[in-house]
Image (tube, rainbow, N blue to C red):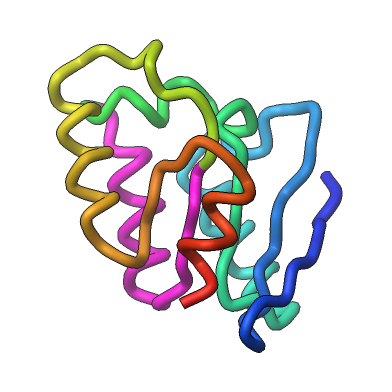
Amino acid sequence: MKIEPHTINNIQIAETISDEVIINHAEDGLDLLGNLYYQGFDKIIIHEQNITPAFFDLKNGIAGEILQKFSNYRVGLAIIGDFSPYQSKSIKDFIYESNKGKHINFLSSTAEALIRLAH
């Protein structure tokens, strides 16, 4: 995994770059949060293809556990990708509600994520 740093308005944003899934379990998300927070990043961008598809099945609790930690530590998170394959009403509602807030957003591009996280 490579970290691509972005600085906008004195906000340190880490974009994770990888050809592999880097979040398979809730613990992986917590490790990523802790490591990047320790390195001084305020906000994190992760690509949807780097997250296990199980994350998008809300019944197993992986998404809730990970996103709760990001909210508790007040570290902004943008997950970028194409979310159209996830057709369940619960995940669509979850993405819609998350995007109304500031801490967790599901967006389509890095550029869009950087604009959202820059505040």
Query: Which quadrant of the view contains residue 93?
Result: top left
Image x and y of residue 91, in percent: 24, 28
- Residue furthest right in the image: 2
Q: Is residue 114 left or right of residue 57?
A: right
- Residue furthest bottom in the image: 10
Check the image and report above or below for 52 versus 98.
above
Task: Give, as a single range, the part of the protein colored magenta.
Answer: 60-79
* Residue 42 shown in magenta: no
Check the image and report above or below for 8 versus 56.
below
In this figure, what is the number of numbered marks? 0
On-image quarter of the N terminus? top right
Image x and y of residue 5, in percent: 79, 66
Predominant SS along the magenta part:
helix
Residue in the image at 70% along x and 55% along y: 15
Residue in the image at 66% along x and 88% along y: 10
Q: Nearer the viewer, residue 100 or 22?
A: 100
Image x and y of residue 38, in percent: 68, 79
Q: Which of 26 and 67 is in front in this view?
A: 67
Image x and y of residue 50, in percent: 64, 32
Residue in the image at 53% along x and 39% along y: 80
* Residue 61 shown in magenta: yes
